[in-house]
Amino acid sequence: MTKPIPEGCEGLIPHLKCEDCAAAIEFYKKAFDAVELSRMPAADGKRIMHAALNLGGQNLFLADEFPEYCGGKTSNPKALGGTPIVLHRYVEDCDAAMAQAEQAGAKVDMPAMDMFWGDRYGVVTDPFGFSWSLATHQRDLTPAEMAEGFQQMLQQAPQPPA
């Protein structure tokens, strides 16, 4: 019997539209140790209709853009000037993961630092315009401890101009 949800595809799967899907696949392999599961080339032989990667046990789908199937619209982050979406990954060593991503070509937007909620946390943007937050959980905190840490962070944060 065919399963309505394929094995390994449970839960939410990000599906990224890329400016250059083949290059994105190679970047994610190098930057995040992704494993390529499948790749379906388009009829034009240049673009990729669909690709599946596995990152740390979770699936990530990718495709080149096909504006001809989307009313002529473009939707990759580089063409749009960015995206409000951040892909988040917990990793064993945040600093090492940040360094690996940077060496592969990612831009560090926020260096890794210890955060008030108990994680070591940093943010990079990949060469395709997608933002990735990387974190290693370091301490379990109560809600009261997090609230106190948040207040301390607010007191130290730069104030916006009046």
Image: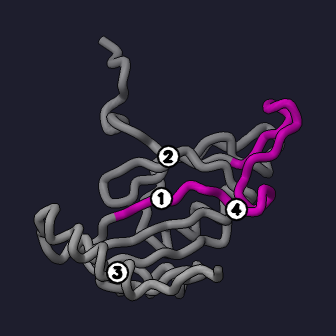
User: Does residue 75 lie above or below 80 as drawn?
Assistant: above
- Looking at the image, is mark 2 or mark 3 earlier in the sequence? 2
Name the residue beneath numbered marker 1.
87
Tell me, yes or no, if residue 126 can be seen here.
yes
- Real-space Cα separation, disc 3 to disc 1, in angstroms: 24 Å
Q: Quadrant of the N terminus?
A: top left
Q: Secondary structure at mark 1?
A: strand
Q: Pointer 2 and pointer 1: residues touching (CB < 8 Å)? A: yes
In the rendered view, does 90 fall on the left or right side of 105? Answer: left
Name the amino acid type tagged 4: Gly
Q: Magenta residues? A: 64-89
Tell me, yes or no, if residue 38 can be seen here.
no
- Real-space Cα separation, disc 2 to disc 3, in angstroms: 31 Å
User: Does residue 46 lie above or below 93 as drawn?
Assistant: above
Please tell me in which quadrant of the rendered image residue 93 appears.
Answer: bottom left
Residue ID at (59%, 80%): 160
Q: Secondary structure at mark 4?
A: loop
